[in-house]
Image (cartoon, grey):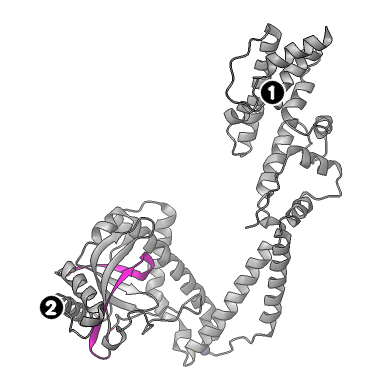
């Protein structure tokens, strides 16, 4: 997002509206110039343009099967990927889910290293911000030497991965295992299955075998038993295991979440039925299409960043316009009224001072009293003794506070975040008495 030291004031808006050729959007944009953000905006425009021309030169996937529904399939995968990620994150912060993820619980793991491989929880979710679940996951025996090289999982290069109806991972050679700290996004599903394991023995044994001295040792008995049990479960359920239902089992009631979850479940079932999946060059065609879609989405993104809507001050601008209309500074057509013209002449506290002028609050007063009361607009000190004021000044203070309260409430109703009480509080009368005494001395 763009950021700028620029602050939108009512006077600024009124000035701009008075000189109607300037658009407020332009004004905001120019102020960003000082803070290098205009450059970023131009940069974004340039990026969008480059992408647009690259997109034009890219060839379309033209294939009998992919023409049928590759586009819909891609959208489905995109939705499913995002929805899965979202629900996986909900699951891992949900108290019921955390209870489910006790040691011994069987989970389905899918990330860049594992493709729907079974794992077993060794340690419940921990970690302050990001929750980790320490688990043992089965893999090909020969791939676990380093523990972090990619094996049968999909690569992360393309932002949307093709999702097929996947069987559980089954090693081609001897079954190996790794112990990893998994994040929410790695856990495709929490199954209803539990196996009996000795988690501490497994972790200790794994740590020991990480030491060079013991690296050639065979895995300990607890580890072997856990691995065998996961392999047995895989072989007994090649199509997958039933998993916990976020909505039913965790009683999620948010309508929007429930709807998304249902959509996700439906898509989970139908995602393997798209015609394009039958294409003999499916992987290539999907990769080409996905790359093109990514560029297209990026182009949209950069276009958005380089247009006026992205200026984060726009909402604030609209709020302030509404306040000015409520107070009668500008008409509904955003032309300046007399009040607005007066406010234009003030540099600070334009709303309160204009109200004081228009409500005739200052004119019956002596110059010394006016100066004393207006000192509230410049005095900053919070800690101050209650000033000893004349009756007229006391009334003046109350009137200013009432006006400030009124304006504060109008602002608040127009979605300006500042609470009315804080708006009132900025007017401090600690100097009123001193200024009054001083002004009296000047006059007499
Ligand atoms: Zn194809």
Q: Could one spot residue 242 in this view of the protein?
A: no
- Residue 155: image quadrant is bottom left
Q: Which residues are magenta?
A: 170-195
Give the Cα distance between marks 1 and 2: 79 Å
For disc 1, the marked residue is: 376
Horizontal and vertical percent for residue 7? 70, 44
Query: Which quadrant of the rendered structure holds the C terminus?
Result: top right
Look at the image and tell me in which quarter the N terminus lies: bottom right
Residue plotted at (49% across, 72% down) = 78
Prevailing secondary structure class for the magenta stretch in the rendered image: strand
- Residue 234 position, x and y percent, is 23, 80
Q: Secondary structure at mark 2?
A: helix
On whether residue 51 falls in the magenta region, the answer is no
Vertical order, 397 against 377 (above or below): above
Q: Which residue is mark 2?
A: 221
Q: Secondary structure at mark 1?
A: helix
Disc number placed over residue 113 in the picture, else none = none
> Which of disc 2 and disc 1 is earlier in sequence?
2
206 lies left or right of 376: left
Q: Is residue 201 above or below residue 417?
A: below
> Any magenta on residue 183?
yes
**Res 371 visible:** yes
Going 66% across and 80% down the picture, which residue do you hit? 55
Q: Are marks 1 and 2 in contact (CB under 8 Å)?
A: no
């Amino acid at each position: 997002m763009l950021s700028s030291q620029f602050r939108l004031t009512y006077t600024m808006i009124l000035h701009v509206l008075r000189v109607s050729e300037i658009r407020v959007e332009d004004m905001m944009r120019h102020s960003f110039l000082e803070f290098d953000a205009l450059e970023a905006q131009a940069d974004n425009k340039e990026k969008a343009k480059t992408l647009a021309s690259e997109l034009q030169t890219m060839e379309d996937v033209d294939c009998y099967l992919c023409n049928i529904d590759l586009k819909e399939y891609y959208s489905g995968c995109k939705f499913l990927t995002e929805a899965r990620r979202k629900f996986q994150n909900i699951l891992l912060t949900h108290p019921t889910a955390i209870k489910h993820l006790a040691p011994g619980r069987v989970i389905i793991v899918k990330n860049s290293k594992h493709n729907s491989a079974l794992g077993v929880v060794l340690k419940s979710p921990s970690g302050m911000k990001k929750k980790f679940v320490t688990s043992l996951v089965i893999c090909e025996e020969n791939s676990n030497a380093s523990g972090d090289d990619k094996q049968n999982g999909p690569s992360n290069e393309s932002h949307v991965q093709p999702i097929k109806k996947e069987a559980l991972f089954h090693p081609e050679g001897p079954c190996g295992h790794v112990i990893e700290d998994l994040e929410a996004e790695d856990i495709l599903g929490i199954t209803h299955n539990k196996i009996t394991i000795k988690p501490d023995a497994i972790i200790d044994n794994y740590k020991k075998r990480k030491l060079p001295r013991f690296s050639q040792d065979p895995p300990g008995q607890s580890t072997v038993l856990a691995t065998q049990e996961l392999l047995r479960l895989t072989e007994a359920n090649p199509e997958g295991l039933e998993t916990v239902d976020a909505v039913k089992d965790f009683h999620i009631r948010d309508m929007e979440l429930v709807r998304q979850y249902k959509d996700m479940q439906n898509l989970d079932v139908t995602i393997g039925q798209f015609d394009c999946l039958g294409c003999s060059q499916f992987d290539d065609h999907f990769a080409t299409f996905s790359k093109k879609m990514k560029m297209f989405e990026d182009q949209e993104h950069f276009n958005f960043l380089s247009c006026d809507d992205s200026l984060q001050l726009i909402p604030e601008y609209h709020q302030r316009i509404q306040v000015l209309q409520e107070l009668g500074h500008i008409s509904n057509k955003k032309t300046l009224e007399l009040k607005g013209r007066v406010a234009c002449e003030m540099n600070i506290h334009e709303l309160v001072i204009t109200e004081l002028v228009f409500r005739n609050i200052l004119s019956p007063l002596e110059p010394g009293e006016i100066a004393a009361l207006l000192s509230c607009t410049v005095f900053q000190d919070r800690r101050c003794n209650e000033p000893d004021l004349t009756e007229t000044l006391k009334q003046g203070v109350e009137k200013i506070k009432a006006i400030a309260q009124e304006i504060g409430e109008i602002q608040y109703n127009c979605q300006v975040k500042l609470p009315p009480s804080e708006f009132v509080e900025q007017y401090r009368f600690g100097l009123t008495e001193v200024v009054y005494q001083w002004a009296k001395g000047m006059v007499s």
